[in-house]
Amino acid sequence: MDKVIIVIASTNGAVFDRAMYVEECRKNISMLISDRHCGAVESAIHHGVPAVVLDSSSGEQFSEALHEYFNGKAVDFFISSYTRVFAGRFLEKYQGRIVNFHPALLPACPGLDGFGDTVRSGCQFIGSTAHFVDEGIDTGKPILQAVAPYDPHASLEHNRHKVYVQLCKMFVQTVDWMAQGRIGPGGVIGGSYLSSEFIPNLESAAALQLRE
């Protein structure tokens, strides 16, 4: 049975947009939902993904609107690119099924500027994390992480782009695992942990071959 995977977004949706050019990924996304008209909504429309806007002014209001909208509907997973904190009945019902992507190696550098905070800290590594969403700000259990050396001789944008590509690959791989029913409470079911930029290791050919 096909999994129902919903994307929640409130951003320009650059990672979502790149992932939607991958057919194996796009076909597994049921819809995108947002609290405002944003770049991610435009991207969904461009790629033929159904898009819904539930205008909301706070995380609490949007969480309640999401709970009401999906009440009685079958949903397996949510992928979040939402910049506020989920709360209330929505989070209680779907905790363990909402995954967020963050441009830093959590638990270091949570919050809205994970990449910038990493660079300012002087850390020798940059990276990204896919994690479950809980009541905190980027405090949920990591599912998939990626790491790369920070190159002080390259531009900030060059280093930022490395993290962007990581996030695109992670999005495609996470959707693939969701579609296979391989994301559980403990993370990835049956993942491989060989030395690699990505832990657990990427498996999806579409994720491995993704270039930007």
Image (cartoon, grey):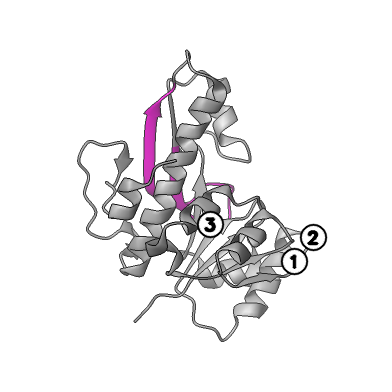
Q: Residue 187, how many percent across, how many down?
A: 34, 57
Q: Which mark is residue 134?
A: 3
Q: Secondary structure at mark 3?
A: loop
* Rendered image: mark on residue 117: none
- Name the foreground residue: 117 vs 92: 117
Image quadrant containing the C terminus: top left
> Is 126 within the magenta?
no
**Residue visible at 40% across and 47% down in the picture:** 169
Which residue is found at the position 71% from the left and 63% from the top? 35
Q: Which residue is mark 2?
A: 57
Answer above or below: position of 116 versus 98.
above
In the rendering, at what x and y percent does residue 81 appear? Answer: 58, 54
Residue drawn at x 71%, y 56% as measured from the top left: 38
- To which residue does mark 1 refer? 61
Return the disc, 3 or 1, that comes first in the chain's sequence.
Answer: 1
Question: Does the segment drawn in magenta span residue 139?
Answer: yes
The type of residue carrying mark 3 is Asp
* Magenta part of the chain: 128-150
